[in-house]
């Protein structure tokens, strides 16, 4: 099988504007992909508001587009508007208030939270305004009424068109992702990590509830990769430094390499390799789930549940991976560390 291919991902700028490096999408992109791509126009017009991610250029590439290039992307997807037809349920899309970060991302002057489609449309640049009008006419009489819908639909189409141009994966902000997710097949390392989160890690949390009860003060279970980043932050430490260190670690580099090899095997229809990787992942998930509460024989971690007047620590084992440099093991080494620390 060929060695591997570089995995690139285009990041939705609104995720950076909304939560910066604490966004789950951004954490995933920074750690699980070889190359990060950021839309140049929306990045540059908001640089003063993105101070929390200064330094991300060290491992991210800003996709430089001039005004003509950006306009061409909008024009390219607008040609399909004559095939769009609104449905009754379309009226309820993005039925939420518009926020400052939404307006900032598309480059519109923010007016007020209850702005409707035409309010936002009137604050766009002349050429993009015409495209927003064409899209509005295409969706009528079932037009989503909110200004958020105008921004969300336009920018979703924008990122999809830019993604196609770049030949990269795409991580949309959760708001746009909810709108488009059913139509977007996306091979992601998060899918594999979530499997272990839902089996191995969840098995421990189920036991915790069984023995200690579902107390309201029991620690909240965050997504495993996000929790891993937070667990490595020391007081006063910048989140960018933590993410950068994790990204550069041997375990994360091997995980990205393993993902690249798996993606290449899928694309080249190397079903034997794909099946071997899936079998190894499933075997380890089942094994680690069964041995969460067994007496420690390898490395263990003490997990403490915070309950008033009581501290209860439970040691559980996640058996070390017998490391060989095949695709499955490259994935499992990083997952092993995630389980030990979350």
Image (cartoon, helix red, strand yellow):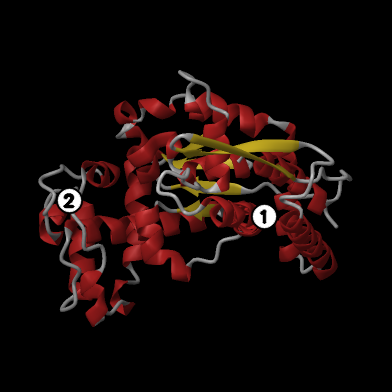
On screen, 236 above or below 104? above
Question: Which residue of the protein is positioned furthest toward the front in this rendering?
Answer: 309
Mark 2 highlights which residue?
126
Query: Where is residue 8 drawn, in percent x and y?
Result: 59, 47
Q: Tell me, yes or no, if residue 158 can be seen here.
A: no
Q: Can you tell which quarter of the image residue 185 is in?
A: bottom right
Q: Residue at 29%, 76% (x, y): give it.
A: 82
- Foreground of the two, 326 or 7: 326
On screen, 86 above or below 118? below
SS category of the residue bearing label 2: helix
Q: Can you tell which quarter of the image residue 245 is in?
A: top right
Q: Can you tell which quarter of the image residue 277 is in?
A: bottom right
SS category of the residue bearing label 1: helix
Graded by Cα atoms within 10 Å as few (under 14), some (14 to 19) or many (20 or more), the crowding at tag 2 reads few
Q: Residue at 72%, 50% (x, y): give it.
A: 293
Q: Quadrant of the C terminus?
A: top right
Q: Quadrant of the N terminus?
A: bottom right
């Amino acid at each position: 099988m060929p060695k591997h291919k570089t995995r690139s991902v285009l990041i939705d700028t609104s995720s950076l504007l909304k939560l910066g490096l604490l966004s789950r999408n951004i954490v995933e992109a920074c750690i699980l992909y070889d190359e990060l791509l950021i839309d140049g126009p929306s990045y540059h017009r908001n640089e003063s508001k993105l101070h929390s991610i200064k330094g991300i250029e060290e491992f991210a590439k800003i996709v430089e587009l001039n005004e003509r290039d950006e306009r061409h992307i909008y024009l390219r997807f607008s040609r399909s508007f004559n095939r769009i037809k609104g449905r009754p349920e379309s009226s309820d899309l993005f039925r939420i208030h518009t926020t400052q970060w939404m307006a900032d991302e598309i480059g519109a002057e923010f007016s007020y939270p209850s702005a409707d489609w035409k309010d936002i449309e009137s604050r766009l640049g002349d050429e993009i305004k015409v495209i927003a009008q064409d899209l509005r006419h295409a969706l009528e009489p079932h037009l989503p009424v909110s200004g958020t819908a105008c921004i969300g639909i336009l920018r979703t189409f924008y990122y999809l068109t830019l993604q196609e141009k770049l030949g990269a994966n795409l991580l949309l902000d959760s708001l746009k992702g909810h709108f488009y997710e059913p139509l977007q097949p996306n091979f992601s390392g998060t899918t594999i990590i979530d499997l272990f989160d839902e089996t191995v890690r969840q098995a421990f949390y189920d036991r915790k509830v069984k023995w200690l009860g579902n107390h309201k003060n029991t620690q909240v279970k965050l997504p495993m990769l996000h929790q891993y980043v937070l667990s490595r932050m020391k007081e006063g430490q910048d989140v960018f430094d933590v993410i950068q260190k994790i990204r550069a670690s041997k375990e994360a580099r091997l995980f990205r390499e393993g993902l690249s090899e798996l993606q290449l095997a899928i694309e080249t229809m190397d079903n034997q390799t794909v099946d071997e990787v899936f079998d190894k992942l499933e075997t380890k998930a089942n094994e680690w789930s069964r041995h969460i509460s067994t007496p420690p024989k390898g490395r263990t971690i003490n997990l403490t549940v915070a309950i008033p007047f009581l501290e209860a620590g439970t040691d559980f084992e996640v058996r070390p991976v017998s490391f060989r440099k095949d695709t499955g093991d490259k994935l499992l080494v990083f997952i092993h560390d995630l389980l030990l620390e979350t």
